[in-house]
Amino acid sequence: MLKSERLQFRKMVESDIEKYHSWRNDFDVMKTTSPSLDLYSFDETRNFVENVILNSTSSRSYIIEESEGKRAIGVTSLTNIDTKNRNAECIIDIVKRIIGEWDTGQRL
């Protein structure tokens, strides 16, 4: 796990599916992160997380949490991991909102 004074990353687990599902179906979250603005059923999200995210051999996903209070604020993934060349693509989705507005002024 990666950890700083304000943030920590922890491996994504099955109990995160419900939270991920709410993020995945929130237009304000997905409009800047997903080329597909579809709505997904809970079963579709569970299937995606279990089969693509949690069981992938070429990617790893982590929930980004505030260190204090452990409130989830986003997800980050390393995809297309190339262990030979020590290379990967990094995806970071920050989804935390404060009082209906994106918290873009706060330094994470």
Image (cartoon, rainbow, N blue to C red):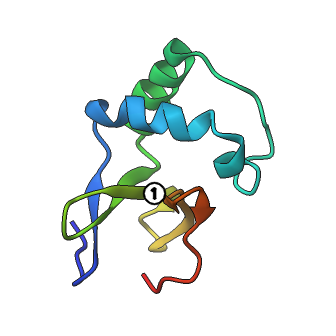
Disc 1 crowd, CA 10 A, few/some/many (<14, 14-19, 20+): many
Q: Which residue is mark 1?
A: 74
Residue at image position (50%, 13%) is: 43
* Residue 24 drawn at (x, y percent): 59, 37
Question: Is 92 rendered above or below residue 39?
Answer: below
Question: Is 37 rendered above or below residue 67?
Answer: above
Residue at image position (24%, 82%) is: 4
For the N terminus, the image quarter is: bottom left
Q: Is residue 7 left or right of residue 18?
A: left
The amino acid at mark 1 is Gly
Q: Is residue 10 left or right of residue 80?
A: left
* Residue 101 drawn at (x, y percent): 61, 63
Give the quadrant of residue 9.
bottom left
Question: Is 40 rendered above or below residue 27?
Answer: above
Question: Is 5 rendered above or below residue 64?
Answer: below
Residue at image position (42%, 81%) is: 108
**Of residues 10 and 32, the one drawn nearer to the viewer in this rendering:** 32
Q: Is residue 72 visible to the viewer in this orientation of the structure?
A: yes
* SS label for mark 1: strand
